[in-house]
Image (cartoon, coloured by chain):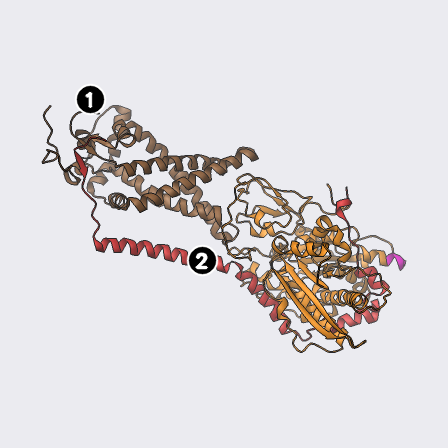
Chain colours: A red, B brown, C orange
Amino acid sequence: MAHYDYIEKAVKVSRREFIGIVGVAGAILWTGAYVATDLVQDRTKYIKLRAQGIYNDDVKAKVRQSHNNQAVTDVYKKFAQNPLSNLAEELFHTKYVDRTKLV
Amino acid sequence: MSQHDEHGPRVLKHPLISRLFHWGLILGFLPAALTGFFIWLKPFGESLQNVIMQIHIVGACILTLSCIIYTIFALDRVVAFTRRIFTWDSRDMAWMKVCGGYPQKMLLGKTIPVPPMGKMNSGQKQMGIMMLFGGILLVVTGWALYAFLPVAPKAAMYWFDMVHLVVGIVLGVSVFAHIFLGIYNWGEFLCMFGDGTQPLHEAEHHNPVWVENEIEPVKGSNITTPGQQQPG
Amino acid sequence: MKGFQSQEVTRIIEIDSKTCKGCDSCKAFCPTDAIEGKYGAIHKINSEKCISCGQCLINCPFGAPKDTVDVVDQVIDKLKNKNLTVVATIAPAVRVAIGEEFGMEPGSLVTEKMYGALKQAGFKVLDTVFTADQTIMEEGMELIAKIRHYALGEPTEHHLGPLPQFTSCCPAWVRYAELYYPELLPNMSSAKSPMMMAGALGKTYGAKEVWKVNPEDIFMVGVMPCTAKKFEASRPEFKSASDYWKTQGRSGSYPDIDVVLTTRDLARLFKKLNIDLKTVAEFTDKDNPLAQYSGAGTIFANTGGVMEAALRTAYFVITGKELDVLEFKPVRGLKGVKEASVTMVDTKTGKEVTLKVAVAHGTKQNVKALLEETKAGKSPYHFIEIMNCPAGCVNGGGQPINPMGTSWLDKAKAVLPWS
């Protein structure tokens, strides 16, 4: 055991001080946790706002189904005949590439 | 009689738990600071940078755990420390003006009169404030950057990283001053890394206000007033 | 480099080694584990594995990954050329996000302002949402042909791939399948993406019927929320328009889509031309048949949107009746894998058919299980929509970077990188 003759007097924390410390510490921690969890929870808010904007575009459109888009019908009438026609296959369909076989 | 005399009355300056905490800080902060420097500059290749990062995280864990354990098991020490670093008066201002007399002593060999100090001198109080706030900032930003990057808002993480870097550099550089001065004051070094005690007259020289007001004889000892030396 | 056809652009996203902190944030979002570099070391993208989706780019807190394909100045040059007809084909997701580059709230629907800005810059418009409607017609009829053949047992004159049919509009998903699930390529819808249809349509029908110019004098600019579209446009097979014109006696070989601008690129172009989206004169382009679109086309931007649009039309074609409620809630929302079934009475045969569909978004978390199930022959679905980016194209790699957001849709949890 170390030999010493003097020791520091005991640190006194009054009840009021203790409550003050715990109160301030708690307030800081709780505020920090609240802000942090809020920010983390809102991390996808921008995505939801954009998605809602798109659904609004749908709701306010005069025509809501692709088959009722007269301009598209005109493309088939004047040009491509009908979906999956030979011309449609040429212009609007494609083939895919097995890239594991490409060097 | 040598300054670090084994005989004569002694005072307990740093209790065991504080000395253990100090070791925790050394084993935690120093590797973290050194590796942090290399994480910032990234001079090495992939494998070594990865090992450096792993050391950084281990150091950070030791630092964080030491702080938490010390706060829980030695709250009175934390309160005492916090009170001391935020208590400043005109003597502290005067001490700062002459830098505690240290440059004069080290560079010119001159000893100048210096205002009487408590357990922590003004420079140590300033370092204490930096370490308290800086340490909290490093630990909080560090854990967010380690564990929460993909889920946390990007702008917040960008600023956390900036704070972590700047505070890390400031504290990392300051700790070298701390180590240098801690060795320069060899008696203090022996105290902190030894059994935590110091000859009373040495404490009277460096920390007279503390000796005057904040210490008392150990129960069961023959001494009735501080400063009274035993014969022989 | 392996896995590329000639002329394809091989590097789109690259990590700036001076900015990268080695924090491993990007790895949490990369669907193909294409990012190399241990934790703490500078990271690098392996272009042979990368599908150019840009999720790493929009999620890096330090902006280290960069889009290296910058054609803004090239487009501005073309806009100045009076002999060219520069056409912009704009994806639906662009119009709810480009406002963010000008200080507006995310989700601000700015179609008329966007059209006005494009007009002021000198672009003509062929809206990708218009060709999205056309994609529904092509892909929808392809699906119905497969259902009639496989589920109702009718003979077919088309060469049909097997069920389930996968959507093909997401170029990151297409390259992912071509690299990692080539055995599922026969299931991929043969329909092109709306952007590529716009390229082919614009340089044929657009040249002939709408703008009345030579097809080789059209410069087609895709404006997309997507960095993978820059790869898609460079695919050498996409010169269908010039192939068509060769059969009509014209010469010349040119791509269907010449260049692609991301939403961010277009905002930069506007700023370089001193066009402020907030104050620009609005333009509805209502006399332009190629800018007329339906609500079904516009919802392509959201996960579940392609499915919902296809169901609105498939229901009508099979039953002869329109859906009472057009909003198909089971395929909407941010859940990783959504499924639904629609029971219809076929007006041609009177038989009842139940269409089982699935919607997956976020390749990294949600798509693999569906693909493995299909590979094992155990898929219960007829039609599967796949979007690589979490939440769909509204959160694509080409969209404005939202500083307070991330693509992490799952429950928030600690990620503890080590190596």
Q: In which quarter of the image is residue C81?
A: bottom right
Query: Does the image show residue B174?
Result: no
Q: Which amino acid lies under the numbered mark 1 shown in the image of this protein?
A: Ser
Q: Which amino acid lies under the numbered mark 2 shown in the image of this protein?
A: Thr
State which quarter of the image contains the N terminus of chain C.
top right
Picture coordinates of residue A13 (x, y %)? 22, 50
Check residue C248 for magenta coloring: yes
SS under mark 1: loop
Q: Mark 1 points at which residue?
A: B2
Q: Quadrant of residue C275?
A: bottom right
Picture coordinates of residue C13 (x, y %)? 64, 47
Q: Which of C236 and C389 is in front in this view?
A: C389
SS under mark 2: helix
Q: Is residue C86 left or right of residue B42?
A: right
Tags 2 and 1 both on a single chain: no
State which quarter of the image contains the C terminus of chain C.
top right
Q: Which of B29 and C330 is in front in this view?
A: C330
Q: In which quarter of the image is residue C406?
A: bottom right
What separation in Å lies between label 2 and label 1 (alpha carbons)? 59 Å
Picture coordinates of residue C3 (x, y %)? 74, 45
Using the image, tell me which numbered label, if any, was put on residue C174. Answer: none
> Which residue is pictured at 35% across the width and 45% down the height?
B68
Q: Nearer the viewer, residue C205 or B143?
A: B143
Q: Which chain carries label 2?
A: A
Check residue C292 for magenta coloring: no
Q: In this view, does C139 lie to the left or right of C107?
A: right
Picture coordinates of residue C384 (x, y %)? 70, 62
Magenta range:
C245-249
Q: How many marks?
A: 2
Using the image, tell me which numbered label, if any, was put on residue A37. Answer: 2
